[in-house]
Image (cartoon, helix red, strand yellow):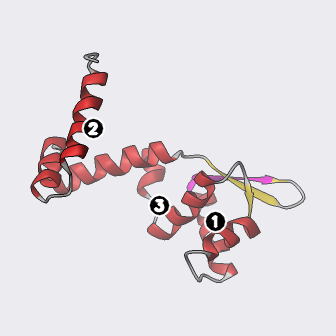
Amino acid sequence: MKQIAAKISGSELEVLSVLWEGEGPMALSEIRQALAQSRSWDGSTVKTLVRRLCEKGALRAEKCAVYRYAPLISREEYRAWSTQDLIDRLFRGSARQLAASLVEGDRLSRGDVQELLELLDRRDGHE
């Protein structure tokens, strides 16, 4: 999945997001309709993005009355790859430096930090 995630463009990610939020495989017309709320892409643009995602192995196409598309990479897999890629590229592999940057940049509230501490406690079995 790492190799697939690395190849996904920002526009392709928008298509994947629509599919992740959907309730199963979607027809091209349904994808277009969902994207129309946030993008003014024409139909051929959406079709091209879907085709590219299929070629990259990020989507599968199922032939019914019309083709229906489903993601082959989950949102969680993509997030995990993206997070690690960000940490590697910007923080030399240090998740601690990422967290410090968020705290120092006032991006995390005290409540956010408390939630993170609770997550760590649960992970370590200290509930």
Give the residue at mark 1. Answer: 50
The answer to which of marks 1 and 3 sits earlier in the sequence is 3
**Is-magenta flag for residue 60?**
yes
The answer to which of marks 1 and 2 sits earlier in the sequence is 1
User: Nearest the camera: 7 or 64?
Assistant: 64
Gap between marks 1 and 2, in whole Å?
A: 37 Å
Quadrant assignment, res 19: bottom right
The range drawn in magenta is: 56-62
Quadrant assignment, res 49: bottom right
Give the residue at mark 2. Answer: 115
Q: Position of residue 63 (x, y in %)?
A: 83, 54
Q: Quadrant of the C terminus?
A: top left
Label placed on residue 41: none
* Vertical placement of residue 106 versus 47, above or below: above
Q: Amino acid at mark 3?
A: Ile
Residue 92 visible in the displayed image? no
Give the residue at mark 3. Answer: 8
